[in-house]
Amino acid sequence: MLDAIDQQGKAVDPQQYRLLVDKLNAELREHQAHPALDELLPHFPAAAELYENLQYAHAGLVRTPLELSLSSELAAREALGRMARKG
């Protein structure tokens, strides 16, 4: 449901959105050790992002693909290097 709301691009009542996020967070906390989460979360990006945020304090960005993170860091370094050479 959260993914559908995010994708529709229409204004949503902030209180209702927050209530939905809070309920989903509660379910994710309750079932965080469930083995099916690894199979389920890739199909629901908004829920996967919430789950990652819940785990961030002790695991960092555990669901962010390493390749994407690495390529972003390398691109930023290259851009900074180009700027330094021009500057």
Image: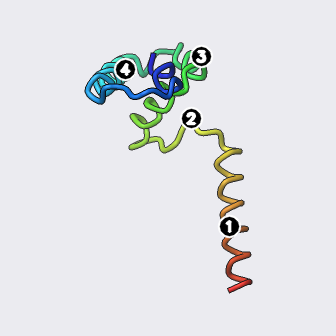
Contact? badges 3 and 1 (CB < 8 Å) = no
Q: Which residue is labeled 4 in the image?
A: 24
Question: Closer to the camera: disc 4 or disc 2?
Answer: 4
Per the rendering, the mark at residue 77 is 1
Q: Position of residue 65 (x, y in %)?
A: 65, 39
Q: CA distance from mark 2 to mark 1?
A: 23 Å
Q: Amino acid at mark 2?
A: Arg
* Residue drawn at point x = 39 percent, y = 16 percent: 31
Going from N to C along the chain, the mark reached first, 4 or 1, is 4
Question: Closer to the camera: disc 4 or disc 3?
Answer: 4
Q: Amino acid at mark 1?
A: Arg
Q: CA distance from mark 4 to mark 2?
A: 17 Å
* Residue drawn at point x = 56 percent, y = 35 percent: 63
Categorize mark 3 by other alpha carbons within 10 Å: few (<14), some (14-19), many (20+). few
Per the rendering, the mark at residue 39 is 3
Q: Secondary structure at mark 3?
A: helix
